[in-house]
Amino acid sequence: MRCFLIILLTSFLMSCSSSDDTIEYQAIPKDLEIPQLFSNLLLPPTIPSDNPQTIEGVTLGRKLFYEPLLSGDGTQACANCHLSENSFTDSDRFSTGITGAIGTRNAMPLYNMAWNFEENFLWDGGAKSLEEQVSDPIENVIEMNNTWPNVVATLQSTSIYPELFTQAFGSSTITKELVTKAIAQFERTIISGNSRFDQYLLGDQNTVTVSEIRGFNIFMDEERGDCFHCHGSNSNPIWTDNIFHNNGLDSSFADLGLGGITGDPLDNGKFKSPSLRNLAFTAPYMHDGRFETLDEVINHYSEGLVYSETIDPLMKNIAEGGAQLTEVDKADLKAFLLSLSDPGFTINPDFQNPN
């Protein structure tokens, strides 16, 4: 069940001027489709005042998300590493860039990002807005290996994009800022909130199994799973705190995570807690994709924790390696986690390639 959050926007009216690239236009506000549970439990999504949602902006952003011209050799789009069928992440442990170079982190899934109220994006918090998050992969030499001047010149020379930018922003002059704004508008529409467990929380008691309820209870139990502190709960259906934690993967760190951004050794080995939605589609798991299965993830928290100086005190029974769950506990917890998956999300036609 879904409802619509009406975002009240003032229509943009720009008058004709002596400039050839500015014309009169009217951008039409775009209503974000907000799941009922989100409306019931969460604050409204974050929409920057300087980048309101419009139909034209979202349409342009969706096209750009799937546009290989953004890469240095015109072969790779954002969607190559953020595939809709994988809940907008990559099924490979590390994505391969246009030169054949391989990254060092698993591509983060893209959904429900308008509720990242802390405005810290990427595994290490290296981007402070969704617009900024869009920018980095373009210039990253391992990923799309392009330059923004080249992106702008390439799009400007096409027969379609100047008109699309005019429709979205009132100017046929394409800029880096407008490209990132358009893609961010589209990404804010990528919303997932219709899993079986969502339906259960909305009152349909027949959508989950006894095992899944037992798993939820383990998830919420501070003496057993205690997962909710980092990954949300029935009162936080985003299923992440969007905060950074060292979850006991390593005793030392080749990748410093948040510490590489802040320069603070106390942040070394901390990475953003990912949402637990759509785990049926987002393997492999962790920032470096080291776990191929959900069973491996659960085993890690049960008996595989590794101590380091920055390990999060929320980790259970660190000295004993973890929560020490029984095999029945593990099966129930896995069942619950999979009940957070939303199959319709991965095939939603609004998110597919329009090109």
Image (cartoon, rainbow, N blue to C red):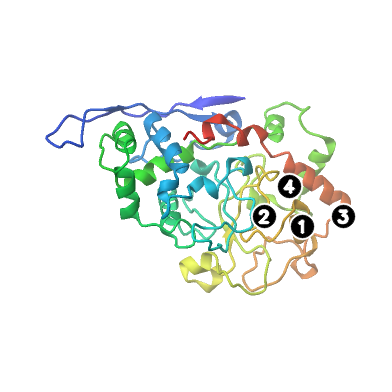
Direction from residue 293 to residue 351 in the image, left or right: left
Q: Residue at x 33, y 38 (%)?
A: 161
Label 1 to label 3, Cα distance in Å?
A: 14 Å
Q: Are marks 2 and 1 in contact (CB under 8 Å)?
A: yes
Residue 168, given in percent of the width and then of the height, sits at: 33, 33
Residue type at mark 3 is Thr
Q: Are marks 1 and 3 in contact (CB under 8 Å)?
A: no
Q: Measured from the top left, where is residue 251 in percent x and y?
A: 67, 73
User: Where is residue 196 shown, x and y percent of the image?
Assistant: 71, 33
Query: Which amino acid does the dot numbered 1 rest on?
Result: Glu
Q: Quadrant of residue 57?
A: top left
Query: Which quarter of the picture shows residue 21?
Result: top left
Quick one: label 3 or label 4, which is nearer the N terminus?
4
Q: Quadrant of the N terminus?
A: top right
Q: Tell me whether circle 4 and circle 2 mark residues in contact (CB < 8 Å).
A: no
Which mark, residue 296? 1
**For mark 4, what is the residue?**
220
Q: Which of the two discs, 1 and 4, labels the residue nearer the N terminus?
A: 4
Front one among 185 and 82:
82
SS label for mark 1:
helix
Task: Tell me if residue 141 comes above or below residue 282 in the rendering.
Answer: below
Distance of mark 1 from mark 4, alpha carbons?
A: 20 Å
Q: CA distance from mark 4 to mark 2?
A: 21 Å
Cα separation between marks 3 and 2? 22 Å
**Is residue 193 visible from the viewing direction of this image?**
no
| Mark nearer the viewer, 1 or 4 | 1
Q: Secondary structure at mark 3?
A: loop
Instruction: Tell me, yes or no, whether the two marked residues, 3 and 4, touch with CB atoms within 8 Å.
Output: no
Say what amino acid the circle numbered 4 marks. Met
